[in-house]
Structures are given as C-alpha cells and as structure tokens.
Amino acid sequence: MSILRISSPRAAAQLVHHRLKIPMDGLLSKAQSKVWLGLMTADMPKEIMAGGGTVRGTITDTTPAQNPIEGVEVKIVGVNGTAFTTTTDANGDYVRAGLPAGRYFINIFKDGYGDRLGKPVTIVKGGDHFVPLKMLKTRRKVENVFDLFVPRKTIEKKQTETDTPGPPDAKQFAEAKLQAHTELLGPLDERASQRLALAAKGVVQQHFEARDDGREKTIQRLETRFMEKIEAGEMTRELALGVLETIKKNLSDKNSVIDASGITAHRLYQQTIKDVLSEEAYAQYSAHQAERRAWRRQALWDLVVACMDTQLLLDNTQREHLETAVEVFAPLSRRNSPPISMFFLLFQRQRNLEILTPWQQGEFKRVFGPIALERK
C-alpha cells in the first residue's frame, strides 16, 4: 500500500533506501550519485528527522578474500558539522549508537590505506543501519632506506566541512540529472559535448525562471481570492493574512525541494540532442527512450494489478481481465503518472468491479476505500 501511494521519484528512492535498504555502491556514476543524494535529502519526512538510531557495518579490503581491517577510524559527520567517532574491532566491525536522526556522511581512515570520504547515510528514528565499506591498500613510497625500518608518524585527520560534500541544491540536482541523461548517449566528440553542456545550462536557467514565475502567479491569485473573501465578510483580515503567510511559506519550502522530473524532456535539450547525433544514432536514442517509457508505464500498471491480487486473491480469469483493461486504459494515462492515479483510472467505471465476487467487493471497499477518500 505504501508503494501504491508513491507519487514521485523522491518518494520511490527514499522507500528503496530506508525500507528496502538496497545498496548503491559501485552502481551509479558521479552524476547519478548526486541525483541519488538529492532524492535522499529532499523533503525529508518529519518522522525521519525525529529520534535517533544506530550505524554499524564491516570494513574490509578490496581483495577477493575481503579481509576485515582492524583499527579503522570511522567518523560519522552530520550535515551540520557534528561528528561522531568509532573504531573497527578485530573482525572489522564498527558500531555507533545514539545518533540523532538526520543526514550523515561516513569517512574512514587508516594508515596504509586510501581514505574514503563522504559515504552518505540517513539515520531514522529507532533505525539500525548496516553500512559495509571497503578500503584500498596503498603502496608505501620509499623516500629513504631508513623509511623501511622507521615507522611513519600517524597524521591526524582533521574533519572539515569540505571533507564531505553536502546535499546538492535544486540547481545542482537539475544539472546532475541532465548530465546523467547525457551519459546515456554514449561517447561524444568535444563539439557535441560542449553544445549539450551549453544547452543544459540554458535549460536549467529557464526551468527555475519558470518555477519562480509560477510561484509568483500562484501567490497573486491567492491574494485576489482572499481579498474577495475579506470583502464578502467570509474571513477577517487577520485570519486571511495569517493563512496567506502560511501558504507563502509552504510554497517556498515546496519550491526549494528538488523537482526536476521533466527537465530532460525540455524542448531545447531534446533538440540539441537531435542536432549533435547522427540520424542513425538519434533513431536509436528515440527508440531507446520510447522503450523506457513503455517499460515504466507497464511496470506501474503491473504494480496496480499486483496490489489488487495481493488484497483480493484474484483468480486467473479476473487477473487476465484486469490486465486486458490495463492495456485499454494505459494510453489514457499521463506520462509519469503515479500508480495511485492509474489505479483510479482503471476502476473509475464500475464494470471492472463487476468481475469481483461479493466478498472481493467488500474487501475492495474496506482496503481501497480509505485511499479513495484521500483522493477527494
């Protein structure tokens, strides 16, 4: 039911990270990692920000044997600069409890190994987070024959705010998303890369100008509406001003949250892609994009039917009927529509409910009824 309510890539990513705890180490490019970090830190739910939790893990080397490393200094640094330190034991294990809920970066140090900085983790209330890490052993450069016999002095690592990159702001997030999309095009010559970079810069600027303009127009409409209510005696001036200030604050908070879901489809960016690619390469790109859109849409529709099957225990005839109905309604759904919207598109006509038994219809009202009320 949580998945069915997902309405944004941000919510989906946070569900994967906080609930399913799927690791992303080694899977993402630099640009994708910035997008992922932005999704993790944007619009953090209040229940995540309250309370505290524990971080634990095992640190090993990068050999196939994955040998545990003892004596690794582990610094867990909050975005506000607060740092918590612990050390790995003989098994390479570390644990740090009592961390206030929030966003952190894990840095690890040990003489003879390459430092690793900026591993992100979000502590949730009462959470027990497992974060395994690996360290690459470094070869010691011999400056003097005596260095072979005289141990080096351990240099104390000082934590600074620049050690760990902070979460990207909305502009950096949008730029990273465009860069990640550009990487899907494959190797490009210097001229094509420069044109796409220039186009991306213009697209980001236009995106945020349009966002700010939309916010101002919304506020102007609300001011006009509240003035009419005041003149009609439906609201006092004090109440209207208070509500308007709250709405302005919420709009400001909402617009500060990362939201660039459609930026890669910007007309200028897409036209630049068409201009820099050959006809054959652009045809392959277009086919690939169409395939991705169809895959995403089908995956969401399959999710709706799967949720129905989980709750109502559909027989094969009922399931096949719903899958056929999905194929009929799919072209009517908007691109990037959340599953919950598609759910109501599928069941807005009672004929799809007629295939259910009386017990299933009762379960449908009991389980999915509250969601229907949320949508009103």
Image (cartoon, rainbow, N blue to C red):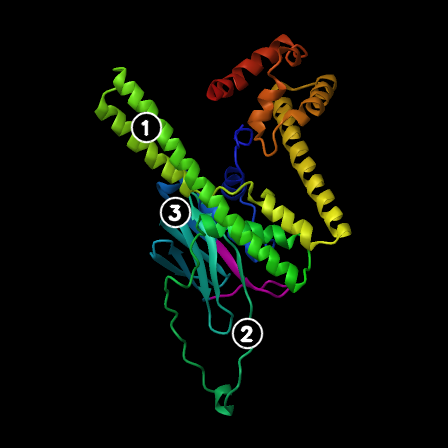
Count of picture labels:
3
How far from the left and from the top, in percent, is residue 318? Answer: 71, 17
Q: In the picture shown, does residue 142 fall above or below 267?
A: below
Cα distance in 3D space between marks 1 and 2? 63 Å
- 3 and 2 marks in contact (CB < 8 Å): no
Earlier along the polypeptide chain: callout 1 or callout 2? 2
Q: Is 327 situated left or right of 108 in this image? A: right
Cα distance in 3D space between marks 3 and 2? 33 Å
| Viewer-proximal residue among 341 and 147 | 341
Residue most extreme to the right = 280
Q: Quarter holding the N terminus? A: top right
- 1 and 2 marks in contact (CB < 8 Å): no
Amino acid carrying label 1: it is Glu
Q: Is residue 58 magenta?
A: yes
Residue bearing mark 3: 102
Q: Is 72 situated left or right of 345 in this image? A: left
Residue bearing mark 1: 223
State the residue at coordinates (36%, 57%): 84
Which of labels 3 and 1 is toward the front? 1
Residue most extreme to the bottom = 145
Magenta residues (range): 57-70
Tell me the number on the disc at residue 138.
2
Tell me which secondary structure the magenta stretch mostly adopts: loop
Which of labels 1 and 2 is toward the front? 1
Residue 302 picture quarter:
top right
How far from the left and from the top, in percent, is residue 266? Answer: 58, 43
